Amino acid sequence: MPFPASPALTMEPDKLSPRQFELFRDFIYRKSGIRIEATKITLLTNRIRRRVKARDLADFEAYYRMLVSPAGEAELEQFLDEVTTNETSFFRTPHHFEWFKGPFLDEMVARPGLASTRKVRIWSAACSTGEEPYTLAICLAEAAIKLRDWKVSVLATDISEAVLRQARAGIYRPRALQEMSEQRLKRHFEPQADGESFGIRPALKSMVEFRRHNLMEPHPGPPFDCVFIRNVLIYFDRDSKQVVINNLIRALAPGGYLVVGPSEGIYDMLGMLTKHSHFAYQKPLSGGGTS
Ligand SMILES: C[S@@+](CC[C@H](N)C(=O)[O-])C[C@H]1O[C@@H](n2cnc3c(N)ncnc32)[C@H](O)[C@@H]1O
């Protein structure tokens, strides 16, 4: 039986009961790896209530039943979008991008192993509404001289289709652009008709490919020379963190770097990676495995 019968879920529509809270928590954990803290019942209630209203359903019970039924597949992304935290901004933690644009790219173009392909692959894992991968694209555009004749691709993924839609649209309000200089704003964005928002220029947009991906699953395809995993694992429990980290290490090319956010809580879980700085960890140039 995929989910318990109603008794556990019946009742007061205003607040999740402790039992209901557990059911939704478990469901979120199974689907995303995110472990909602036991104290967050009011927060989760408020977020789920918005979805119950949006679907015009009677109560939490009806919503849960819909979510776990085959018809719930379409609702799942809206649900995950509501319960996950998508906050992000351009040039968030600026020194990560200074390192990326300078020492990292210098090392890549000088690395003998890459000279024959002249390809560098970057992955923004958990990209939210696109600010992180577009920041990487801005860095690449600004480093164009040293990247002449090189092909650098940026893949950006997230579990939520809702944030990916916004990312693909590439329209941003001033709040997301606080770290952006006037010069960068002019070069890479065009003002929108509403007089407030800015849209990513097509040349920059075409540098980033957006796709849906759940970090709890291995990433298919060729390995990456740099993976950004920032401000996401903070919401995962230790077991899920380890699953994600193993998947990311597998997805790194030999010599590739993992760039870690300041509050990920994974510094003691990075196995075979060598600490290069407090935020960049490198996979050995030779050897395999995940730990
Ligand atoms: C706070 S944002 C971080 C955005 C960006 N990396 C940054 O540092 O600004 C966290 C993102 O992680 C995504 N996320 C949560 N669980 C995920 C999972 N299991 N797989 C992929 N993305 C996930 C959320 O949808 C959200 O967009």
Image: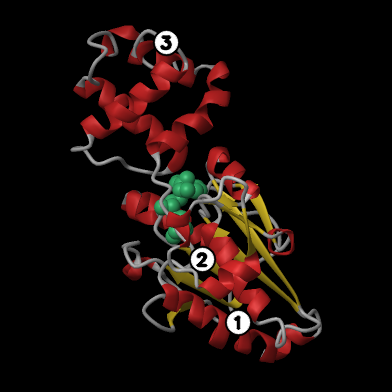
**Distance between the alpha carbons at the discs numbered 3 and 2:** 39 Å
Q: Position of residue 20 (x, y in %)?
A: 27, 21
| Label at residue 228 | 2
Mark 3: which secondary structure?
A: loop
How far, Cα to Cα, is label 1 from label 3? 55 Å
Proximity of marks 1 and 2: CB atoms separated by less than 8 Å? no
Query: Ligand 1: does it lie within 8 Å of the C-beta at label 2?
Result: yes
Q: How is the image coloured?
A: secondary structure
Q: Earlier in the sequence, mark 3 or mark 2?
A: 3
Q: Quadrant of residue 39?
A: top left
Q: Residue at x 56, y 86 (%)?
A: 102
Asked if 99 appears above or below 215 in the picture, the reply is below
What amino acid type is highlighted by mark number 3? Answer: Leu
Q: Quadrant of the N terminus?
A: top left
Q: Is residue 93 left or right of residue 213?
A: left
Is residue 218 visible to us here? Answer: no
| Residue occupying the point 47% across, 16% down | 55
Residue 235 x/y as whole percent: 34, 49
Q: Viewer-nearest of labels 3 and 2? A: 3
Q: Secondary structure at mark 2?
A: strand
Q: Nearer the viewer, residue 160 or 31?
A: 160
Residue at 54%, 81% in the rendered image: 284
Q: Is residue 31 visible?
A: yes
Say above or below: 228 vs 16: below
Instruction: Report helix, strand or loop for mark 1.
Output: loop
Instruction: Determine which residue is flagged by label 3.
Output: 57
Residue type beneath disc 2: Phe
- Residue at 25% across / 21% down in the picture? 16
- Asked if disc 1 and disc 3 are in contact, CB closer than 8 Å, the reply is no
Amino acid type of the residue tagged 1 in the rendering: Ser
- Which residue is the site of mark 1? 286
Residue 290 x/y as whole percent: 50, 66
